[in-house]
Structures are given as C-alpha cells and as structure tokens.
Amino acid sequence: MKEQIRLLAQGVEFSVQNRMLLTRFALFSSSAWMQSRLKTVEDALVANAPLQEVLQRVADHFLYNLEADLVTLYEYRPERHDFRVPPVTAGEIVVEAAMKGTIQTGNLLWDCLAQASRFYPELPAAFRADRSDSSTEERFADREGVQSCAVLVLQTADSREKAGIIFVNY
C-alpha cells in the first residue's frame, strides 16, 4: 500500500511540475509575441520610416495586443490646430467613407484631446448623444457598434504637446 501511495504522489508531483512548466512556457511565449509586435514599431522608428507607416504599426500593435475590434488613431497637428484625416485604422470599419470628412469644432475628438486618457467599460452618453457640430452623420460609436473603448491621448516625451488620440474600441 505504501508503494502505491508513493507512486501516486510521484504522479501527482510530476503532473504539477508539468503544469507549472507549461504555464511558464505560455507566459514566455506570450511575452515574446508581444515584444516581437512592438519590435515592428521600433524597426519603423529606427529605419526613419514615414510617419504614416509608424502610426499604422502602432495601431496594429494596439489591435493585436489588446485584442480590440477596431483601433482608430488620429494624428493631431498643433501647428494647424486640426486632425489629419482619414485617421489611421486597424481592424474592420463598417462605413469607411464616413472617416474621410473634416473634424469640425464641437466634434467629440476635441473634448477627448483636452482630457487625460480614459477607459470606458460602457460608453458615456457623449459618445452617442446628438451631435453638437453641423454634421448629420450617425455617431461613430453607433455606426460601428462600439460597446466600450479606451481613449489614449498621445503626447510628446516632455508632455508639453499633444500629438494625437488613439481609440481602442470593443
């Protein structure tokens, strides 16, 4: 009987060690995958790639690493006090033509630019409210079926100048 208990204990110990090893391997694999995705952004920066290519890689990185449905990156141009359109996107857009218009005063983007980065597990009313600008188009969140999102304000390294906004949509 002692021998059977000893063999059972060894089997359990082996199973636990195997599970721990597989867990460590999965974490290592996940970390390596994320680093490789970030490496493409670094490569674009080091290669002095065009800004749009770098921004596209950033959007792709957010899409895959955060498992989002759609990422929208608006480049803000402070010298012109406007956003470049169309924005850089990663993921599938339902109505792509709607992304090509100008960003007017009163658009939600201006409010987001003025605030800190945020996560909205449920979209606030402002994302779905009647438009305060002159556009008659349906709100992005309604048109694209967005349920929740993170809004990240991009700033320069010294945090003095805003450089854009990323919407990570689910």
Image (tube, rainbow, N blue to C red):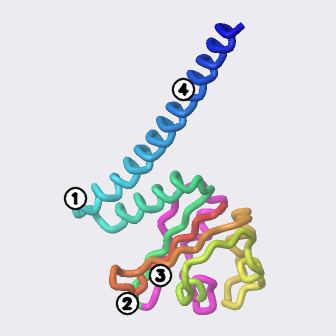
Q: For marks 1 and 2, give the CA distance.
A: 26 Å
| Secondary structure type for disc 2 | loop
- Per the rendering, the mark at residue 160 is 2
Q: Residue at x 60, y 76 (%)?
A: 118
Q: Position of residue 120 (x, y in %)?
A: 68, 72
Range covered by the magenta-colored residues: 81-110
| Label whose residue precedes the other's in the sequence (4 or 2) | 4
- Per the rendering, the mark at residue 47 is 1
Compared to residue 131, the image places residue 74 above or below, namely above
- Specify the amino acid type for callout 4: Asn
- Specify the amino acid type for callout 1: Ala
Query: Based on the displayed image, in which of its 4 quarters is residue 114 positioned?
Result: bottom right
- Per the rendering, the mark at residue 18 is 4
Instruction: Confirm whether the magenta stretch covers residue 90.
Output: yes
| Label whose residue precedes the other's in the sequence (3 or 4) | 4
Q: Residue at x 33, y 68 (%)?
A: 51
Q: For marks 3 and 4, give the CA distance.
A: 52 Å
Q: For marks 3 and 1, give the CA distance.
A: 25 Å
Image quadrant where one finds the N terminus: top right
Q: Who is closer to the viewer here, 121 or 142? A: 121
Q: Which residue is mark 3?
A: 83
Q: For the residues labelled 3 and 4, say whether their Cβ atoms are less than 8 Å apart.
A: no
Q: Nearer the viewer, mark 3 or mark 2?
A: 2
Instruction: Confirm whether the magenta stretch covers residue 100.
Output: yes
Q: For the residues labelled 3 and 1, say whether their Cβ atoms are less than 8 Å apart.
A: no
Q: Nearer the viewer, mark 3 or mark 1?
A: 1
Q: Residue at x 55, y 83 (%)?
A: 116
Q: Who is closer to the viewer here, 7 or 75? A: 7
- Specify the amino acid type for callout 2: Arg
Q: Nearer the viewer, mark 1 or mark 2?
A: 2
- Specify the amino acid type for callout 3: Phe
Q: For the residues labelled 1 and 4, say whether their Cβ atoms are less than 8 Å apart.
A: no
